[in-house]
Image: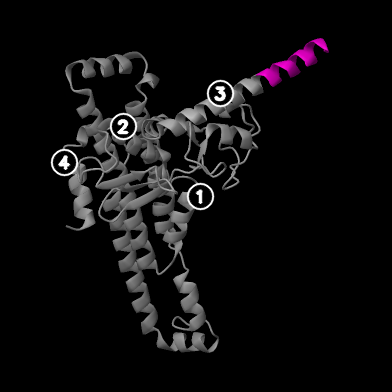
Amino acid sequence: MKFGEAFSDYLRKDRERFLDKCSHVEYKRLKKVLKKCRVCRAAQQHHDDDDDDEEEEEEEEGIGKNGPLDLCSFESESCSLCDQMFFTELTKEASEIARCFISRVRRLLHPSILCGLQRYLWRLRHCFMDDQQIMIQEGRLLLDYITMNSIAIRKILKKYDKIHRSVNGRNFKTKMRAEHLELLQSPWLIELAAFYINLSGSSIGEPGEFFRMFSCDLCDTQPRMIIMLSDCVMYEYSLTCSICLEIVFNPYALGCGHLFCKECACSAASVLLFQGLKAASHEAKCPVCREVGVYSNAVHMTELDLLVKNRCKDYWKDRLRAERAVMVKQSKRYWELQTVTVFGY
C-alpha cells in the first residue's frame, strides 16, 4: 500500500475521536498542488522547447533554456505557489502537531497538571477502567499520530524536491530541525519509551505492542535508547550527560532537546540547584549547541529518572546523596552571603 493510501486509511479509521481536536498534515491537498505544479512546469518547458530560434539566440549569450547557466538556475528555481502552500503551511502544521503531541503526552504522564472538569473526568474514567491498558492504548495512539504525520512531511518534501529539481525541501527539513519542529526529535518520545519500560518492566518491546521495536541499555559504556516507530523510521537517543559523561541523573531536557543532569545544567546556567533551571537568565546557552533561551522551557524527565532509579539503583542512590550534599553546601553559602548583604557581617 502506498503511503498516501495508508495515511488516508489512518485518518479514516477509529481515530476520529482522538484526532478531533488535533491538527494533521494536509497530505492529499498538498499532493494535488504538486501535481498541478508538475503539469504547469511540463507545459512551460514544452512551450520553451518549441521556440527554437529564441533558444539558440539565448544560448549564444549563455543564458539559454538548456544552457549550463540556465540549467543551474532552473534547478535552484523556486515555485511561488508551492513555496506559499508548502513552507508556510507545513511550518504551521508542524507547530500545531508538536504542540498537540506534547500536550497529550504531558496529560498522559503527568495527570497532576489537569485541573477542573478535565481532572474530574480523568479520575472518573480511571475508576471504571484498567489504568494500565488505558495508558498503553493512548500512548500507542500518540506514537501513531506523531509517526504518520512525520512521515507525511518527509514524503511531501521529497516530492517537492523531485518535481522542482531543487533542495528547498531538504533545506526546509534542516530549518525545522533548527527551530525544534522536527517531530521525532522531541524528548517526550524518550519519556514515552521510559514510561512503557517502567510500566511493562521490559527493556525490549514486543513488535506492535507499543513501539514497532525498541531497546534500552543502561549498562553499556554508552547508554542509549533505540526506538523504531515504523519499518523505515528509527531513532537512537543517547542517555549520557554531555557534561559529566555519566548516565543522566534527575534529567532535564532543554528547549533545544539536549539532555543533562539537573546539577550539570544548573552549573552550566550559573544558577544554584535549589533555584532550579527556571532561574537561569535568558542569555544562558546550551552547553552543546550554544543556543540561548533554552532553560525557561526545560522539561523534567520524570519517567526517565524513574527508569534510571529502577535499573541502576546503586548509581542512582550515590548520585542522589552527592546532589543533596551539593544543594546543602550551596544553600548554606547562599544564605551566608545574604546575611552579610543585609546585616553587614
Please give the label number shown on residue 13: 4
Mark number, residue 198: 2
Task: Describe the element under mark 3 as helix, strand or loop.
Answer: helix
Of all residues, the one furthest to the front in this rendering is: 314
Query: Does the magenta run of residues contain 335?
Result: yes
What type is the residue that disc 1 sits on? Ala
Q: Is residue 192 left or right of residue 291?
A: left
Foreground tag (1 vs 2) = 2
Q: Residues within 10 Å of mark 1 (few under 14, many from 20)?
A: few
Residue 178, which numbered label?
A: 1
Which three-letter amino acid code belongs to the residue tagged 3? Arg
Q: Which residue is mark 3?
A: 324
C-alpha distance separating marks 1 and 2: 31 Å
Q: Earlier in the sequence, mark 4 or mark 2?
A: 4
Q: Residue at x 29, y 46 (%)?
A: 214
Looking at the rendering, the stretch of residues picked out in magenta corresponds to 332-345
Q: Amino acid at mark 2?
A: Asn
Q: Quadrant of residue 303?
A: top left
First in residue order: circle 4 vs circle 3: 4
Q: Position of residue 283 (x, y in %)?
A: 65, 37
Q: Quadrant of the N terminus?
A: bottom left
The reply to whether callout 2 and callout 3 are in contact (CB within 8 Å) is: no
**Among the two numbered marks 2 and 3 on one chain, the one whose residue lies closer to the N terminus:** 2
Above or below for 270 versus 149? above
Q: Which mark is residue 50?
A: none
